[in-house]
Image (cartoon, grey):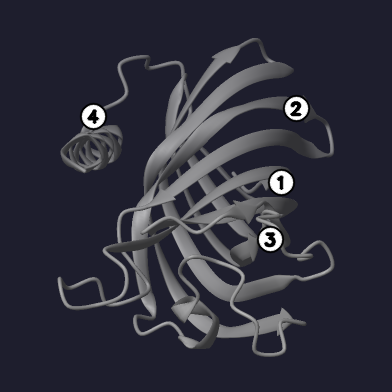
């Protein structure tokens, strides 16, 4: 937890530095771009005590605004609607649980604040985005055929709605950008780890940890504004 908190603070400092640092190359002109993105999420939840899971597949999409402040440095802000959650895996311990399933879909609006670092030429760039992210839970939905069975060592989560709607964490990852005359096409992989829990995690509660982690594959299309 201390390590992730330090990384989060460093990314915030990097984001602020990217705004505050004046451009050193007088020939470079700052660049504003905006556009849309869409992708697929592969998510699970870090529970303590542990809950056996497989990856939950959901979708994400939203709006992106990017400001390139220097030749290789900028900031990027997004507003996304995303699906995350978890899907449980029931190991066979002598009972026939192979046909059972339980899934929880959690719909969020999230807002990443990212430092954008890029390398490459005029047409093709490799980039890395990194920074903090906040999110707001809109609703959640479950699907199962357990019919009262308790196939996990811990099953309380099946009937527990989220008690906290605000989420925050850190995310980032690499990507590839193709710049053309009609706009910029981006392909990106991103990992997000929530530093907050969506359940109460006091000593007297069922779980000591209940936080999301999400791997996202996304494409984006940006148009230069000026």
Circle 3 crowding by C-alpha within 10 Å: few under 14, some 14–19, many from 20: many
> Within 10 angstroms of label 1, few (less than 14), some, or many (20 or more) residues?
some
Residue placed furthest toward the front: 94
Q: Earlier in the sequence, mark 2 or mark 4?
A: 4
Tell me, yes or no, if residue 62 can be seen here.
yes
The image quadrant where one finds the C terminus is top right
> In the rendered structure, are the residues bearing label 1 and label 4 in contact, judged by CB atoms less than 8 Å apart?
no
Return the mark for residue 179. Answer: 2
Q: Position of residue 197 (x, y in %)?
A: 33, 66
Is 153 displayed left or right of 100 in the figure? Answer: left
The numbered mark, 1 or 3, whose residue comes first in the sequence reads: 3
Residue occupied by mark 4:
21
Q: Residues within 10 Å of mark 4 (few under 14, many from 20)?
A: few
Q: CA distance from mark 4 to mark 3?
A: 32 Å
Horizontal and vertical percent for residue 20? 21, 37
Q: For marks 2 and 1, give the CA distance.
A: 10 Å
Q: Secondary structure at mark 3?
A: strand
Give the structural element (helix, strand or loop) at label 1: strand
Picture residue at 34% right of the left edge, 80% below the top: 164
Question: Looking at the image, do the residues carrying marks 1 and 3 touch, with CB atoms under 8 Å apart?
Answer: no
Residue 134, how many percent across, how many down? Answer: 38, 63
Judge from the rendering whether residue 78 lies leftward or rightward of residue 96; answer left or right: left
Asked whether 24 or 178 is in front, the reply is 178
**Residue ID for mark 1:** 223
Asked which quadrant contains residue 185, the reply is top right
């Amino acid at each position: 937890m201390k390590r992730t908190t330090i990384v989060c603070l460093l990314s915030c400092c990097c984001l602020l530095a990217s705004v505050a640092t004046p451009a050193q190359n007088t020939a470079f002109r700052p660049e504003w771009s905006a556009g849309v993105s869409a992708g697929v999420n592969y998510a699970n939840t870090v529970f303590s005590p542990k809950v056996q899971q497989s990856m939950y597949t959901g979708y994400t999409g939203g709006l992106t605004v990017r400001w390139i402040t220097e030749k290789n440095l900028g900031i990027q802000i997004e507003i996304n609607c995303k699906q995350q959650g978890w899907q449980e895996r029931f190991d066979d311990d002598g009972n026939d649980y192979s046909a059972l399933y339980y899934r929880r879909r959690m719909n969020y609006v999230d807002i990443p604040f990212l430092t954008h670092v890029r390398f490459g030429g005029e047409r093709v760039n490799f980039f890395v985005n990194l920074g903090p992210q906040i999110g707001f839970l809109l609703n959640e939905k479950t699907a199962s055929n357990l019919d009262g069975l308790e196939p996990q060592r811990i099953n309380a989560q099946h009937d527990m709605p989220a008690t906290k709607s605000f989420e925050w964490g850190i995310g980032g990852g690499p990507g590839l950008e193709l710049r053309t005359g009609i706009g910029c096409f981006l392909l990106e992989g991103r990992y997000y780890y929530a530093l907050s829990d969506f359940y109460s995690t006091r000593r007297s509660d069922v779980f000591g940890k209940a936080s999301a982690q999400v791997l996202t594959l996304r494409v984006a299309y940006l148009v230069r504004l000026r």
